[in-house]
Amino acid sequence: GLKRREANVLVVGLDNSGKSTILNYLKRKEDQVEEIVPTVGYTVERLSGIERNRSGIALTAFDMSGQGRYRNLWEHYYDSVEGIIFVVDSTDALRLVVARDELEMLLKHQQVVLDNKSRMNDKQNGVHDDGHDESNKNGPNHEDLSTDMNQSINNDRSTSSKQDIPILFFANKMDLKEALPTVKISQTLGLHQLPHKQWHVQSSNALTGDGVQEGIDWLLVQLA
Ligand code: GTP
């Protein structure tokens, strides 16, 4: 049979975008809830999803709500998150800019945590911090050496960078007539300027599930 693998996927997006409804759709029938209430804080959802996806990868979603939690989130889950699902309400043109700012913040915090982690690794490997008081008192030779070392660290960092984790955007509520086209959504979110190369916008109707599986399938291909 298929080999099972767990993949932790972060589910984020503004309130009312449809995150809980999408997760609910992806759940096993017996785990689905009839009425979805607004999320307080964040909940960790474990999705079996095995019977729904051919690759046999299990998705675990961190359903976020509330602001300013990203830093905290990345610090706890950085090592385990392999992908991001970002849900957008396609009918909420006004708040698309807010969604863009949230996306930027999310990815910025990810980068900060990444930088901190690699600095911690540097320390563990016996490499001294740049700009330490003592190094200022030393001659230029020492400085040259430390610059070389930092350069080699930067090279290591770029090869092991987790910057390229795939991001799936659900342009949700596509059933409503005021829904914006996906092209407009990717433009407003500034996706072509992202450092991430693996992203995809999938229009969806979370109420019926239209487009949801297609989006998940794209993500699963990236995670395989
Ligand atoms: P928070 O928990 O507040 O963060 O919201 P959320 O992102 O989890 O949104 P939720 O799933 O609670 O959906 C918000 C509202 O939008 C609910 O009334 C849903 O029924 C509705 N909704 C979600 N997806 C769709 C969709 O694709 N089409 C339509 N028409 N309504 C949707």
Image (cartoon, grey):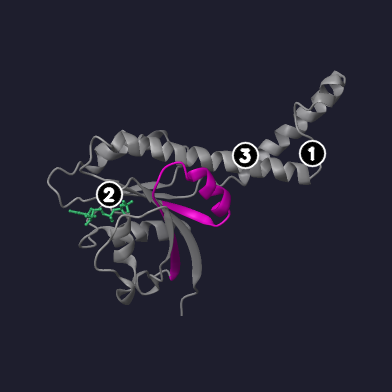
User: Residue visible at 28% across and 53% down?
Assistant: 18
> Label 2 CB, ligand 1: below 8 Å?
yes
The label nearer to you, 2 versus 3, is 2
Q: Secondary structure at mark 2?
A: loop
Task: Indicate the amino acid at tag 1.
Answer: Val
Extent of the magenta region? 56-84
Residue 195: percent from left, percent from top: 47, 37
Task: Indicate the amino acid at tag 2.
Answer: Asn
Give the distance between the C-alpha atoms of the residues marked 2 and 1, in whole angstroms: 47 Å
In the current view of this chain or complex, which residue is farthest to the left? 177
Residue hosting label 3: 115
> Label 1 CB, ligand 1: below 8 Å?
no
Residue hosting label 2: 16
Crowding near pointer 1: few (<14 within 10 Å), some, many (20+)? Answer: some
Q: Is residue 180 left or right of residue 103?
A: left
Residue 224: percent from left, percent from top: 47, 61
Residue hosting label 1: 127
Q: Relative to residue 14, is residue 130 depicted above or below?
A: above
Give the distance between the C-alpha atoms of the residues marked 2 and 3, in whole angstroms: 32 Å
Q: Is residue 191 left or right of residue 78?
A: left
Circle nearer the N terminus (3, 1): 3
**136 magenta-colored:** no
User: Residue visible at 66% across and 38% down?
Assistant: 155
Circle nearer the N terminus (2, 3): 2
Q: Is residue 54 left or right of residue 112?
A: left
Residue 36: percent from left, percent from top: 27, 61
The label nearer to you, 2 versus 1, is 2
Residue 208: percent from left, percent from top: 20, 62
